[in-house]
Amino acid sequence: MRLILGSASPRRKELLAGLGITPDLILPPDIDEDPRKGELPRPYCLRLAREKVLAVPAGPDDVVLCADTTVALGRRILGKPVDAGEAAAFLTALAGRRHQVITAIAVRRGDRVLARESLSTVRMKRLSDAELNAYLASGEWQGKAGGYGIQGLAGALIPWISGSYTGIMGLPVAETAALLTAIGYPVWRRE
């Protein structure tokens, strides 16, 4: 049985490694990640995880694992910023406020698909101009939902979370282990 990780994220690969799991293949799917008109963050995130897992080519006994992480400020979806200007706008909107980080995971084996979500609340501190500019200059905002990654420099900007730290990073480990086990992948016993 092969495990196919449908993600190019080095963080997801590292979090799986923490469980002692090394994917046999890494095949990131190419899907349209634009939100639908009026789509709310949680259903959007779950839809993307499911669409990703169905888009990865796999054999009938392969296990495919995909995830999507979305930052939500109220009903607003903050995706991956396209440039430093949009990253600055996202970080400015998040500064001094609480927001939600949703990570949906989906696994597939044959025609069976299981999915779950992890919901965390995060508070970002108020940012000085120097902090904002230094973070933008670091480039760490690139490719990250909401324009930040808690596991890097932005960790210094996050004084409080409620939920799953690994979920905020992009792959909630407890939920992932439970889904892999439920789909028949031997998380706890491997030869």
Image (cartoon, grey):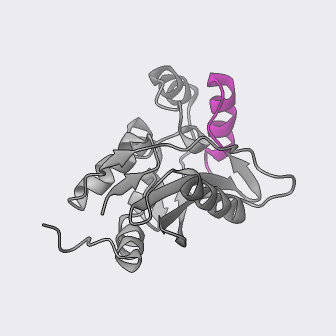
Which residue sits furthest left? 191
Highlighted magenta segment, given as a residue range: 79-96
Residue at (60%, 62%) from the top-left corner? 50
Q: Is residue 25 above or below residue 185?
A: above
Q: Please identify the quarter of the rendering in which residue 39 is found.
A: bottom right
Percent position (x, y) of residue 17?
25, 53
Q: Is residue 55 above or below residue 157?
A: below
Q: Can you see residue 87?
A: yes
Residue at (58%, 58%) from the top-left corner? 54
Along the viewing direction, whichever of 40 and 154 lies nearer the viewer: 40
Residue at (58%, 53%) from the top-left corner? 52
Does the magenta segment cover residue 75? no
Q: Is residue 16 left or right of residue 57?
A: left
How many numbered discs, if any? Answer: 0
Q: Quadrant of the C terminus?
A: bottom left
Q: Quadrant of the N terminus?
A: bottom left
Residue at (39%, 61%) from the top-left corner? 62
Q: Is residue 165 left or right of residue 130?
A: left
Along the viewing direction, whichever of 79 and 107 lies nearer the viewer: 107
Q: Please identify the quarter of the rendering in which residue 44 is found.
A: bottom right
Does the magenta segment cover residue 93? yes
Which residue sits furthest bottom? 182
Percent position (x, y) of residue 74?
73, 59
Percent position (x, y) of residue 161?
47, 61
